[in-house]
Amino acid sequence: MDATLEVVVEIPRGSRNKYEYDHETGHIKLDRRLFSATTYPAEYGFVPDTLSEDGDPLDVLVLTEDPTFPGCWIEV
């Protein structure tokens, strides 16, 4: 049994930019900038080929030592 998943990072750890992956075009777009001192505490992304209750792929937070970049595929 394979115990790993592939995750696509939308927003890197420490970022104040909110990015969205456009599933139709495959592009990552800047949605907005957070206008407070709040940053994302972990890599935020989704698991491809899944479907959550809101109709989008399953959201995930991935703990990493260093931030990656929007669109990075990682195994978890």
Image (cartoon, rainbow, N blue to C red):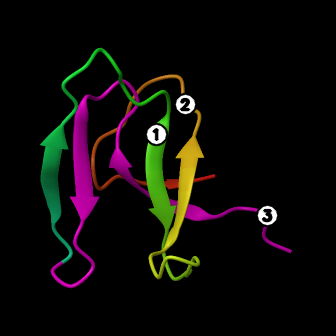
**Disc 2 to disc 3: CB gap under 8 Å:** no
Amino acid at circle 1: Glu
Q: Which residues are magenta?
A: 1-25
Amino acid at circle 3: Ala
Q: Is residue 64 left or right of residue 56?
A: right
The residue tagged 1 is 43
Q: Mark 1 or mark 2, which is nearer the start of the sequence?
A: 1
Q: Residues within 10 Å of mark 2 (few under 14, many from 20)?
A: few
Q: Mark 3 or mark 1, which is nearer the start of the sequence?
A: 3
The residue tagged 2 is 64
The residue tagged 3 is 3
At horizontal 25% and vertical 44% (from top left) the residue drawn is: 18
Residue 52 percent coordinates (x, y): 57, 76
Residue 24 sits inside the magenta stretch: yes
Does residue 7 sit above or below 12 in this rendering? below
Q: Is residue 2 left or right of residue 68?
A: right
Q: Secondary structure at mark 2?
A: loop
Residue 44 percent coordinates (x, y): 45, 46
